[in-house]
Image: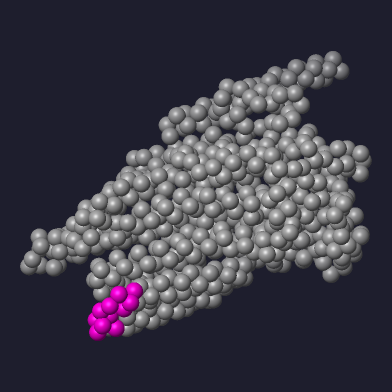
Amino acid sequence: MQKSLSVYDSDGSTFAPLVVIELVSETKEEAIAWLLNRVRDKQQDGGAELLVEQLTPGAQGTEKDNPNVYVVGASWQRLLYGAEDVGLFKEFKDGSMRGFTYANKHNFKEFQGDGDGFLSMAECQYIIKHGLDNLRAKDEAHVPGYPKMKLYPGKSVIRRMQSKGILVQVFPLHEKEELKRLSFSWFKKIKLSFQPLDDIRHYFGEGMALYFGFLEYFTLALIPMALIGIPYYLFDWEDYDKFTVFAGFNLVWCTVILELWKRLSASLAYGWGTLSRKKAFEEPRPGFHGVLGVNPVTGRAEPLYSNAKRQLRIYLLSVPFVLLCLYLSLYVMMIYFDMEGWALMIHDEEPTFWTGLLLFIPSIIYAVVIEIMNLIYRYAAEFLTGWENHRLESTFQNHLVLKVLVFNFFNCFASLFYIAFVMQDMVLLRQSLATLLITSQILNQIMEAFLPYWLQRRRNKKAHKRMIKTMEDKELPLSEQVKLEADMSTYLGTFDDYLELFLLFGYVSLFSCVYPLAAVLVVLNNVTEVYSDAFKMCKVFKRPFSEPAANIGVWQLAFEAMSVIAVVTNCALIGMSPQVKSYFPESETQLILWVVGFEHFLLASKFILTFVIPDVPKHIQIKLSRLEFESLEALKKRSIKLKKKQVPSLNLKLNFFVVC
């Protein structure tokens, strides 16, 4: 917890500021007073029971500063009760991970005294966010001061005010000393060692830690392929008859690493207490709208929307739109091939050094166009998925991921499939793969790290310089810290980061057998990605709220789908090699049947391997089963005690009845 900075609540209570709420500067006083009262009210009265106070401007405050900035904290008792409400798992004295309960708090390993320090700052901020998100309208017809801003019973107050533009942002504060230590161990000193995943999880939460864990694991898993690829590249540069060995290695590699990652992520999630954590009931997402009705599960009033209407929107507009985008992508690809033919014709007419360089220009232009098209499509997909009006955030994310993956896969890999299986030009395939891979890596590094940092410096150059000089070395006043962090860019989640890894996995698993250096380039990219992502999380973006996670979610399915496509692709490449064709000199049909049969055998082996390798290690399965058994036994003992208490009372009633 952050001890150095503290503020006083209206009742005189001292608390550490953990979360910032910023309203628009012209927000009406009655709306502010109503919101603050709801935040402070007792939970049994429908409030969040949190401590909140207006941020007082510092010595350097100006008239342009927004006065409606508030810091939120909570008492330790409220945080501990909140830990039980959100279902946090903590290490028990016997070493097992158990759901925290306030009544049983002293039996947890790290609980000492009144519990000060038992919860990390990230966990406290997550509890506060949970409390704010669960502020629900009661009998208010509208937000005070805003008659047109209607409220429905059970509607989230915070989400309603955000969607209507009254609430500018809600973000957690950085803990400067802990951030300084994390920055030093994470990216400030260049060293060959594993990332501090426990520290990342402690500061940013399990979802972020799992992303960096997967990034590290993917990089390490690429090393064997890179070590094989270097001599393969050096000695068999033009000998494509021997790429069958490398393709065979790809087939085994892409299956095994994904199965082993499941086990590693399960081990990490168990140690962090999220593996057996029950998923909370999902509330409607902020943008969901519909006719007011009653939720049959919660009994609360909330908007309802017909699933039939949603399906009509998906199949009558979303699907045709995606198909149109795929057609445009195909059209751009054909323009790229025309450019390739033009460059090749010029080089054949006058083979010089400069015309040799000209051969790479179409691929570079195409790679840049691909990145631009992916970016434009991403915004269109977000708008379209929002228009489909999905009730749950998880459903919204699944549909968005599906749209983006389909387009990105087609846009990035269609040209490679065309070159490989229609043109059957392995030299051009190698050249195109190398150019697309290198260009996309350079553009991603610029877009993800350097561009946000440059924009931040340009937006608030003086403040950013002061932050670099004083935020690390001196104690900044709370008002200055809040002002600096409020102006930082907002981190939009790990979606784009996972998408980049997905595409790199595709480049490596699909066609790296014709360009063995692909794995080497991806390893180098991932190493720089670790440092650039760590830098932007600590220096460029606001601190995101921690999100509990037991795995990488829908991205696991995406990577597994890519591995299935990789099996089919590599089998086809093996069948096209002259080395394999020489075994079937007379019948091409036999070759096709042999390749298809071999591909089916590998797919069957892949799925068998999925069942053979358990997703959760045996020792963790035993611990989870033991914990479940102990919980059932404790429940039985409790029910027996209740029955024993009820029996004497029943006997007394019978005796009284007999006497009467």
- Residue 3, given in percent of the width and then of the height, sits at 77, 36
Q: Which residue is drawn at 86% across and 37% down?
A: 14
Q: Residue 184: x, y in percent? A: 59, 41
Query: Image quadrant for the C terminus?
Result: top right
Q: How many labels does the image show?
A: 0
- Check the picture and name the quadrant holding the N terminus: top right
Residue 607 shows in the view: no
| Magenta segment, prevailing SS (helix, strand or loop) | helix
Work out whether residue 181 or residue 511 is closer to the camera in this orientation and state it: 181
- Which range is magenta? 346-357
Q: Is residue 449 magenta?
A: no
- 350 falls in the magenta region: yes
Instruction: Give the left or right position of residue 468, taking residue 49 as reference.
Output: left
Q: Is residue 489 visible?
A: yes
Which one is nearer the viewer's eye here, 625 or 81?
Answer: 81
Name the foreground residue: 641 vs 548.
548
265 horizontally vs 391: left or right:
left
| Residue drawn at x 51%, y 76% as measured from the top left | 321
Whether residue 618 sits left or right of residue 472 in the image: it is left
- Point 42% across, 48% down: residue: 218
Q: Against 575, is 55 above or below?
A: above
> In which quarter of the view is residue 423 placed?
bottom left
Is 618 drawn above or below residue 284 in the view shown? above
Where does residue 625 sit, x and y in percent of width and height? 50, 30
Residue at left offset 50%, top offset 44%: 190
Which residue of the protein is positioned furthest toward the left in this rendering? Answer: 586
Residue 59 place in picture, x, y as percent: 87, 52
